[in-house]
Amino acid sequence: MKKKIAYAIILLGTVISVSFAFYRSHSRGNAEESPTNLITNLLPRKQGLAYKSEWETIEYNVRALHEKVKKNAADLKSLLLLSSIYIQEGRNTGNFIYYNDAALRCINTVLAKDPKNFEGLSFKATILLSQHRFEDAFTIAKMLQKSYPLNAYVYGLLVDANIELGNYRDALTAADQMVSIRPDLRSYSRIAYLREIFGDPEGAVEAMELAVDAGTPGDENTEWCRVQLGRLFEQLGKFENAKIQYRIAANYRVNYPHALSGLAAVALRNQYYEQAVELYQQADSLIPDHFIKEGLAAAYRLIGNEQKAAQMANAIIAQLQQVSSSRKDATHQNEDLELAHAYAGTGDYARALEFALLEFKRRPGNIEVNETVAIMYFNLGVYEKALPYINAALSTNNKKPELLAYAGLIFAKTGDKEKAKRFLQKATVSKGMLDPKLHDDCSRLLKKLSK
């Protein structure tokens, strides 16, 4: 079972209000901090992700900023610029842990000297969101809103945090304020995600098309949105439209892993399993992304290679545990929901349920968390316990086929035949979007209930 990518709309690397075009160094005298602690070398990009001109620009800018910080570790503007580059480079390469650490060292130095610094606080909230520390990010965003009530980026942070915490109406309010202040790629993409959550995939497509049109072709954030547009087309069963978007993204940004993953997903839906495996392998070789690994594991299963599917599933768990379990300091990641999905991928639903319930304690209003708990209870055969969670997951009218499928199965097991039929009918219309076994289970049950 593949978890939906939640950060379709966060755009982690977007620079808020600092840029080289308007750069002026603000020196505050001799710094007590060691400049060495604030300088993090860029990791070499894999050859397929080099994008020569982009990489050369990044290397040049980082070298220049390092020189400034070496001369004065209290040069806050340089530290903020470094932070913005580190954040985006984490997104470009998938090395989030390394670059989040680098960015946070700079950001914390800025905030130690200027606790109310807007860029510093905004970047910190952005990193907290990427670490799945949503309450902490929300606290910062609310504080920023009081001081900067007309700043679009602040409302973007509020949208993201509220979505993850399950405060969907508050997220809508923040998104409306954001797009009214600044209608751009960042605001349109968030509108698209909220429309999807509230069961309007057609409206989500319209908003995501606006987001793509507002971006610069080839820019990572633009092509990320284009990939999300493709995923929305997939949800509507328009696989050719989805393929077109993925191909465009792959052309504008050659070897873009998320575009390759999208093409692999379409190949999987069209039952071109060997092609899907090749595309997922190519994407997996470029960035460490457990969602891509989940897709590859699913493709291995469909070609009958259970050994490799199991190896990939275990690799996902190892990757997530390394990220979360070994990090209990101020920069730790929370990966409980992701671990729930990972253990489900190995068939260990009891362990998966443990992690899902841990996440539920933190985010009881989030529909994806509720859906995950419900699915684990269903797979463990504890159908009555699954019922309240699946009802909560359906509360926004989300039309994701997998959600509808499990809702139908759970309602059937708990005796609500009519509701089961209704949801199973909706789910089985989207054959290409369901795991083949899940689709077959739903189809058989629907026939049985319809007799």
Image (cartoon, grey):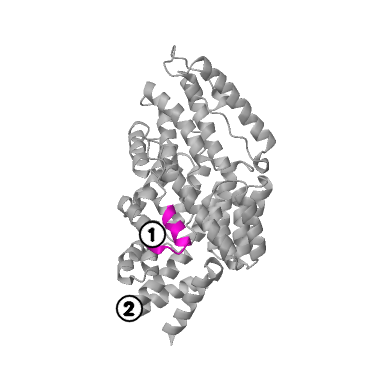
Residue 123 at what x, y percent from top left? Answer: 44, 34
Residue 394 at what x, y percent from top left? Answer: 37, 64
Tell me what residue is drawn at x 46 percent, y 21 percent. Answer: 76
Dot 1, crowdedness within 10 Å: few (<14), some or many (≥20)? some
> Can residue 414 be spotted in the picture?
yes
Dot 2, crowdedness within 10 Å: few (<14), some or many (≥20)? few
Relative to 368, does residue 162 appear above or below in the rendering? above
Residue 397 horizontal side relative to residue 67, left or right: left
Labels 2 and 1 touching (C-beta < 8 A): no
Residue 415's disc is: 2
Residue 202 horizontal side relative to residue 171, left or right: right
Residue 347 drawn in magenta:
yes
Alpha-carbon span between mark 2 and mark 1: 27 Å
Quarter placement of the C terminus? bottom left
Identify the image quadrant of residue 261.
Answer: bottom right
Residue 362 horizontal side relative to residue 82, left or right: left
> Can residue 396 be spotted in the picture?
no
Q: Secondary structure at mark 2?
A: loop
Tell me what residue is drawn at x 51 percent, y 72 percent. Answer: 437
Taking depth in this image into account, of 388 and 147 the one nearest to the observer is 388
- Which segment is the magenta one? 338-350
Q: Secondary structure at mark 1?
A: helix
Q: Give the mark toward the camera: 2 or 1.
A: 1
Residue 106 drawn in magenta:
no
Which kind of residue does numbered mark 1 sit on?
Arg
Identify the image quadrant of residue 376.
Answer: bottom left
Tell me what residue is drawn at x 46 percent, y 19 percent. Answer: 34
Residue 351's disc is: 1
